[in-house]
Amino acid sequence: MELGPIQKAWIKSLKEHPERQNKNFLGYILSSGEYKACCLGEIHIIGCKMRSLPIPFYEGRIKDGECESTLIDSYKDYGLRSHTGYFDYEVEIKGIIYTSLTDMNDKGLTWPEIADYVEAHPENVFSESK
């Protein structure tokens, strides 16, 4: 599977900005104006930037649809299989089983590790190129 422009930009950002990684929330703004995000929040931010849409920060946190911890309304915009980045098949890395991007992000993989996995196995993460 060939990755699309949003997906490639997201992988690049995961590799270049691991200091932004956050767990358990799509993302939030720091008092410095910088932000922290989970890997799914980062794809949402990258997608908004690339489509010249405002980044969906409300009251300091990223919100999307009815649930602020998932991409309920927009995961298909990025070619993801589900709002949690659910995989087509389970993955074992370093003895831990992962079923989604949410698992990878919140159970301790770094953004560069997540990016490396996605590059090697895009068909397990995405249903189409975007």
Image (cartoon, rainbow, N blue to C red):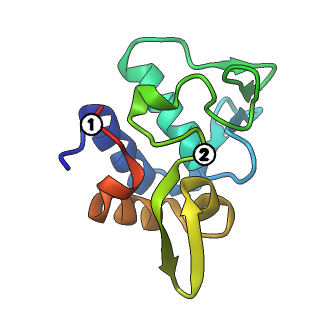
| Residue 77 placement, left or right of 128 | right
* Local SS, label 2: loop
Please state the horizontal and vertical placement of residue 121, each as a whole percent of the image.
31, 62
Q: Which dot marks residue 13? A: none
Front-most of 77 and 108? 77
Image quadrant for the C terminus? Answer: top left
Query: For mark 2, what is the residue?
Result: 84
Q: Residue at x 63, y 61 (%)?
A: 103
Marks 2 and 1 sit apart, C-alpha to C-alpha, by 17 Å
Please state the horizontal and vertical placement of residue 101, each as a whole percent of the image.
54, 55
Please state the horizontal and vertical placement of residue 74, each as a whole percent of the image.
53, 25
Query: For mark 1, what is the residue?
Result: 129
* Local SS, label 1: loop
Q: Residues within 10 Å of mark 1 (few under 14, many from 20)?
A: some
- Image quadrant assignment for residue 5: top left
> Of all residues shown, which one is farthest toward the bottom?
95
Q: Residue at x 57, y 88 (%)?
A: 95
- Image quadrant assignment for residue 26: top right
| Residue 67 placement, left or right of 71 | right
